[in-house]
Image (cartoon, rainbow, N blue to C red):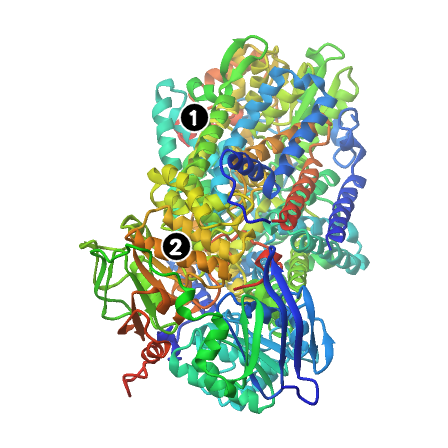
Amino acid sequence: MNAPDPPLLRMSGIGKSFFGVNVLEGIDLDVRSGEVHALVGENGAGKSTLMKILAGVHPADTGHIELSGERVEFSHPVRAQQAGVSTVFQEFNLLPERTVAENVYLGREPVRRGRVNARGMADDTAGLLDELGITGISPHAAVRTLSVAQQQIVEVVKALSSDARIISMDEPTAALADHEVELLYRLVRRLRDRGMAVLYVSHRLKEIFDLCDRATVLKDGRRVDTVPISATTPTELIRMMVGRPISTFFPDPIEGTRPGPVRLEVAQGGNDRLDGIDMQVRGGEIVGLAGLQGSGRTEIAHALFGIARFTRGEVRVDGRRVALRSPTRAVREGIALVTEDRKTQGLALSQSVLANGRLVLDSVLPFRARSGARRLPGFFTSLELVARDTAQEVRFLSGGNQQKVVLAKWLATEPKIIVLDEPTRGIDVGAKRAVYTLIRELAAAGVAIVLISSELQEVIGLADRVLVLHDGRIFGELPAGASEEAVMSLATGSHNNGREVA
Amino acid sequence: MRIPRALLAGGAAMSLLLTACTTDDPDSADAGQELTPDEEWFDAEEYENQLAQRDIEPEGPEDEPWLQAIEPEMADTSEYKLEGEDAEEPTVCFSNASVSNPWRVTGWITMQQQVEVLQESGDIGEFRVSDAADDDNQQISDIQAFVDAGDCEAIIISPSTTATLTPAVEAACESGAPVIVFDRGVNTDCMVTFIHPIGGYAYGADAAEFLVEELEPGSTVLALRILPGVDVLEHRWAAAQQVFGDSELDVLGFEFTEGDGAQIKDLVTQHLQRGDVDGIWMDAGDGAVAALEAFEDAGKPYPVISGEDELSFMRKWQEEDITAIAPVYSNFQWRTPVLAASQILNGEEVPQEWVLPQQPVTEAELDDYLERNADMPSLHYAKFGGEDLPGFPDAWQDR
Amino acid sequence: MTRTAVPTAPGRIAREAVSRLVGGGSGTVFALLILIFAVIFAINPSFAQPPSMLAFAKQAAPLVILAVGQYFVIVSGELDLSVGSLVGAQVVIAAKLIDGEESRTVPVILLMIAFGALVGLVNGLVTTVLRVPSIITTLGTMLVLYGAIRLWTGGAPTGALSEAFRRPGRGGIEDLPVIGQLPWALLIALAVGAAALALTRSPYGRTLIATGDNDTAAAFSGARVWRVRTTAFVLSSLLATAASILIGGFAGVTAQVGDGLEFMAITAVVLGGVVLGGGRGTVIAAMAGALTVEALFTLFNQLFLPSTIQPTVQGLIIIAAVGYAARQRSTRSP
Amino acid sequence: MRSLATARPRPFRLGTTGLVYLALVSIVLVGTAVAAARGHNLLGTANLVDMLTRSSLLGFVAIGQTLVILCRSLDLSVGYVMALSSVVAATTMAGDPARIGLGIAAVIAVSALIGLVNGLVVTRLRVNAFIATLGMGLIIKGYLDTRYKGPAGDIPEAFQLFGYTRIAFLPLSAAAMVAAAVLAILFLRMTRTGYHMYAVGGDAEVARMSGIHVERPVITAHVLCSVAAGAAGLLVAARFGTGSTLVYASGYDLESIAAVVLGGTYLLGGRGGVAGTVAGVLILAVLDTVFNILAVDPFFKDVLRGVIVIAAVAIYARRQVDRTASRSRFAGSRGGPSGGTGDPPHPAPAEQGGRT
């Protein structure tokens, strides 16, 4: 474990807390040059926060960072870059309207004789792209015209151009179609071969075992252990991440929960992103939707909620055919959608807890608003919402509590059908617990539940059935408690051999 | 981080406030007392001159004041006489400052009516107009456009501002076509004739003298002005300051109202809250009624007031039987330029400086003028002098 | 922060009210308002007399009403530059159509309301459906109204208003003990204020504010964003119409009526701590902002401040107040 | 996502700037036809001069305004800066040809200072640009009205030439304006500050993460904008032969914004450029001239302008919609759909700092 000379990166005793909630505590981590180091853990384990501290976005409350033995302070992302630490965030730091070259050198534009050396920028960018064996990206292309994968490459090139010695990537495959993942693998290997250190944040065991040399496991903001990949197994790793066998982590169905009649039925549903979607959800049933991002999970949620509606096929609620033209209609039909992106889609951040809780009632069911609002405090309490009071602005709440506000908002509408898109993304374990319990309670109350999550254990642990999506189609159905591998193999489409993926 | 920001803010604010204060003119700083007109706008000689002109019998036809002139010095215009088919329906071009207030609108209608008459008679052909909408730069372009077009036989200009249009007018003169300026002047005498009523000093003095006469010594007077920096208006105020200065009246101060009735009423109401106001001096009639209403609403007796020959005011004056005078900035001057143009193009001589008569409407003539304009809208001007034009009265009624 | 259940009514109501009023820099405006009045009274005690105060209220009423309208638009994340010229247009329309005939008063007022609603509808739809930035939309409307009205009247207003039309802006309940006349304008402004307050507390109002804060979230919660915003524009135009009735009634017709009112209204609202960009600030504070602006002018007048320098002071105060409010917001801790 | 995963070649489409110039050309053609019908030659020297002169004044202001808007800010004080500059120039020169240089220097200094204050108030005090510059305008207005009663100072003949000379049909002032435009374009294309203006306007947070001091470009833009307005003031003085305090009433502030947006620059910053703005200005000028030839009622001009500006922006907005499709990966609704109130870009406050 201990190298002769100090490792390229050493983080020791890193601690961080937001709004009184400890997100990280005493994290030690060291990464050597020429290694791909996985940082694994469930969502909310603290991976992203740790990265942001490394990137200089957040200052650490405690602990310090060393680069090849020298202590460094990253007051600003740029300090980190200059020190040779570059980060590729899940949400790219790119300007869609500017060209690839301009983005790569953003803030570091080379100047010659007082003028920005545009040609030089373009040439160097092209050079870097070649080095990585990337084709099909012109330095002069506007970034908005690129695919997500290509945008990610631009981010990496950006990192290289600043002579990074350490590149950390946050869920780099999250947005990629599987054939693009291969491209990323090649990219990462090349970086490693150039003697760089790659900090690879992911919760996808497959990738980790494909790609990484060592893995550091985080759980609830603490470091569990750092292990060489060669010396561990997926199950072992999961055990470390979860800390207990999956089955016990997720609450069991509540006594007396039994599937009722079909509440939601989609027949041959399709639009420009989806095709031939057939699904039925019974009252009291939890149906999981698994699949890689971009496989159509969120698209189904949006179609059911009238945002990007089905242009083909039909949807029935309680056997009645409905036209889900707009969210308004969807809500009127008793459908609720907990969106995957809380901050931009879920909440009006500078409004009070109460105002957010009332939002759906106010905007769709004004006549039920008053009575509905009266029940909100009850929901807040049962969800164990922690806020100063209901007049507090939600932007001051922790991620978990924000999510609780979103859930309360929907509970207040007494939905028949609730679609949960990544309901536990970026929230602490306590909040997760609350969410899981709630899902069970809703099921017991006869609500039809569609659960979307990129955390396979979550889907497997909660859902009665798992529909696996691939490439906009339902690719297969698995019973409760199916193995992750089974789901994955369907999700990656590796089952149907040789089938062309658009 | 925060403190410096606050300091910075304060610093910026202070420095600005200082620059603003240090440049306070004494006269405007304490408007209440200061009563010597500031020399920038006061030309003693011109002042005396205008006051004198009020009593001079103008030459020209009795019943056509727009053709009368006070002490005219005729200018020979034979060089502009058009011969042959040039004389057939010559194109006349008119660069108008704007029609953005009732006075100009009334005059503009009168002018159009006069033009029709002249077009009937073939004295002028095309009458090309461009309206600068009160934008000096726009009007300069407009005049240039006329010059460059080259087919204007005569150019009539009603400048939006005196000083700023001087270069443009000079350019127009150089083009060879006869240039006629009216209403406001410009700082050059290159034009063939400059047509205007006696002027701002006379106007302001008429009003001020009336107040001095009618009011007991020591009575309070409030001056309502439209906006600063417009010479015609500044002259009126300068003259008033001169007159008030020699009087026993106590001038409370002056307010700029932008001619907006609501503002006028606000301001007067506030002054009435502070104490009595016995007299109102206005540099233009717009909103005189609003000023009077302020007294009504405050339950105070009507003041002695100087308005303008605008009908809304004159009607109020008649109804409520107020002690008032309506100084006149002769609206009929809008007829003169086109007539002058046709005269010049016929080679007839015209006054170099064509000073039109400018008689205030007094109590005595009030009923008569209201009689003659009975059917006219309230924002119409009594001395518009278009009664004999064919379009009368419809053209002025449904504008 | 301890793990306690969230405190609820009535404590909540109170807290919410307070935090909404004082929060977001709105506190600034009330302090400023009190300060200004203190100074005015100090200079001129007679101003504290009911009649003077009522006269002040009468003058302030139109701007207060405009501010309310502007508040709805601004809090929904937009801006309405067209109110000034709309007020002007409405007064001129009234004068030309009524032309002194008492009998025409009511029909014309109805027509004005319809016209106001139409203008608001156009502003709203162009902004939401055609996605033209509201600042451009309403700037365009401003130009169109300005031109169209003068095109129609040949440059200067014609006709005259009826007595009945002028009563709301000018008259009141006469000969009351002590206070003398109780102006209709005041009562109307109070009514509008109360209605506005009720509206902001209503489902629509809450949706409106949430939309201004984050329209994506609002849309994902089932709100019809375009409809919500368009309604705000219609409200603004209707209130501008109401204001025009008061202004026309107060001072009659003049060519310049309405000029620059849009900036006055926006200033008032922003002075009230309402944030351009939407989602923050209360209608009460906006109305207080309007009162503050009016009081400011009264103060200038009481101080014999030369009217030419007044804009300078006004500008400084606005910048200072807004800057201060901004700092308050950015430094407020959870 | 899938549909984007493969970077399929996008069909060629005309850039917004191209569109603007297309519009300009077509308007010129239509105008020429209409004018010809009335027996006028729109492209004759007289009218060309007329158009170019009209555009030069608004041009200067609009060029400056473009820079500010690119930074997602706004400047409503330009009209007043113009007025002030014209007076400063006229009073400093005081009719003495020897003092021309001094006058110009004074104008630049004064306007730059105002721009600096604007920039600082917007960035440091975080006062919304709309209010900040509106307030600054009022401050200057008060100063002008108090200090000067009407036109002041005297411009020496030599400098008036700047307002009236012309080479063939090209007025000197228009040439100067074009030169300024070229300079601005080069500035945006060749200096880091120029690059950073786009960055800050496009996404202040990204700019900050990339180590750009987000306040600097904004302040610079405001300074340059004011200086451009100052140049316009100089032109005013040259044409009027004196300083005019009342130009601020001519509404150049809002008109310049209209011209910029008409030129295809995005009101919320980050996209567009000076070239488009120049076209926008020319379009307005051509319309003006055509209206004049047709002797259109001045008030009808206002109506048409209003309609045209709205229509144009609506068209750009349309094009913007389908473009956003490919942006789903970029954080949601930045700056709201159409707030357009020029929110100053500044580092996100702590509670929003970490982007999940």
State whether residue C112 is above or below residue C121. above
State whether residue B280 is above or below residue C121. above
| B167 with respect to D93 (left or right) | left
Q: Nearer the viewer, residue A14 or A73?
A: A14
Circle nearer the viewer, 2 or 1: 2
Quadrant in which the N terminus of chain A appears: bottom right
Residue B204: x and y in percent read: 68, 25
Residue D235: x and y in percent read: 66, 56
The chain letter under disc 1 is C
Amino acid type of the residue tagged 2 in the rendering: Leu
Q: Which mark is residue C159?
A: 1
Residue A144: x and y in percent read: 46, 72
State whether residue A59 is above or below residue C134. below
Label 1, secondary structure: give it.
loop
Residue shown at 46%/86% (left/top)? Answer: A210
Q: Is residue C209 visible?
A: yes
Q: Nearer the viewer, residue A4 or C119?
A: A4
Amino acid type of the residue tagged 1 in the rendering: Gly
The chain letter under disc 2 is A
